[in-house]
Amino acid sequence: MHFDVAPAFFLLGALAALVKADLKFPPSLYQSLTLFLLVAIGLKGGVALAAHGNSDVIWEALAVVSLGVVLPLLAFPLLRKLGQLGKEDAASIAAHYGSVSVGTYAVAVAMLEAFNISYEAYFPLFVVLLEMPAIVVGLALARGTGKDSGYNYRELLHEIFCNQGIVLMSGALLIGYLAGPGADSVMPLFGGMFHGLLALFLLQLGVVAASRLAEIRLNAPFVTAFAVLMPLIGATLGALLGEFIGFSVGGVILLAVLGGSASYIAVPAVMQSALPDANHSLSIAASLGVTFPFNVLVGIPLYIAVITYFKPVT
Amino acid sequence: MNSIPLMFSTVTGLFLTAVGAALASSGIAGWGLFTVGLGILTVAFVSRATASPRLISLNLNNTDGAARLQQR
């Protein structure tokens, strides 16, 4: 029987929080582990891009960005019509579900490596690119883009392009790309310790996710259903797009995971600044309290099983 | 809670339960999706069950109940 270490640590953290165990983390640990993951993923992607990247990557990147535009456009009417949420709440949640989760991506990479499924190693480039379009679409859905929208565009652009996720991942990607094999000197930290630190990250995220669950109590039936159905829609579209682009089995799985994940780092920061009246606890509770656990415990193994069934690993 | 979101969660729960059962029984995937679908159905039914008495209290012109609901 295959036992996945990463989801097990996540479950341990969630169970510890649910039984109110005396589990104490240093306050800055979550932030430190997030920084580590962002740099490690970006650096590895940059090194791979230097080794294997070619002009096709540009077209692949454009196709992947289109996924980030389509997903919030699908989520928004679901949230408005079926969830009967307000315009700003719906737009904020739609942006979360069009963007991606680096934590979910890291878990997917760890699982692919455990299953010995190879993938396009420059995928972190797509992770960086998929962070942004959904934010822009979400803001346009909330208030439009005209002068009467009330946005402070200068502040917004700063939030979108200068949040820690974008800066660290794109920066590390560029450093890895420029350094190529020269990045080997830092790989014992960012490569060798990746799985161990990911386990610690998930342990703490389990605690955070379990504590967020209480916040959806008022809209629990709709939010839980949406936070599970939307990742499945996104993952299906991601897998179809990956197959259309011509990715390997691992690449198709990773694009499914990116399509099915929801942001809980970059988008909340931008939305809190741009849409202060939206219910931010609802969107973060849905993405971190329901979608992230769903993807880690059920979604990713499901995407791997279904995709390898239709597209066997050669 | 409004009936449309409740209906959505019920239909989603039923759909995921059915798809999860089909995937698991054909050996393609585990029972995870089936379990999640059942969980969503349970949340929907529990919410429906707890919502009904409130509506009844409103229909009987129970002003205390209506005031409490408005406060919420």
Image: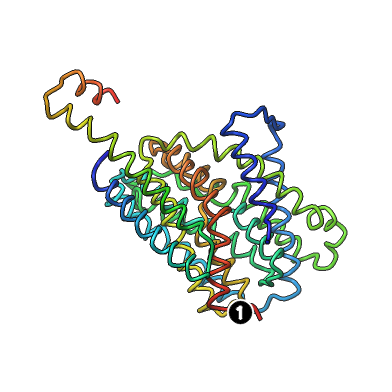
The residue located at (30%, 52%) in the rendering is: B8
**Amino acid at pointer 1:** Asp
Q: How is the rendered protein coloured?
A: rainbow
The residue located at (80%, 52%) in the rendering is: A193
In the image shown, does A186 or B25 lie closer to the viewer? B25
Q: State which chain disc 1 sits on.
A: A
The quarter of the image holding the C terminus of chain A is: bottom right
**Residue, far top:** B64
Q: Is residue A275 left or right of residue A264?
A: left
The quarter of the image holding the N terminus of chain A is: bottom right
Position above or below: A183 against A195: below
Position above or below: A122 against A210: below
Q: Position of residue A248 (x, y in %)?
A: 62, 77
Task: Please say whether residue A109 is visible from this viewpoint.
Answer: yes
The total number of labels drawn is 1
Query: Which residue does the numbered mark 1 point to in the structure image?
Result: A56
Q: Position of residue A227 (x, y in %)?
A: 43, 50
The residue located at (48%, 41%) in the rendering is: A285
The residue located at (72%, 53%) in the rendering is: A39
Mark 1, Cα crowd under 10 Å, few <14 / some 14-19 / many 20+, is few
Task: Please say whether residue A45 is visible from this viewpoint.
Answer: no
Q: Is residue B45 left or right of residue A155?
A: left
Q: Position of residue A61 (x, y in %)?
A: 56, 70
Q: Position of residue A5 (x, y in %)?
A: 70, 52
The quarter of the picture where residue A104 lies is: bottom right
**Residue, far front:** B25
Q: Secondary structure at mark 1?
A: helix
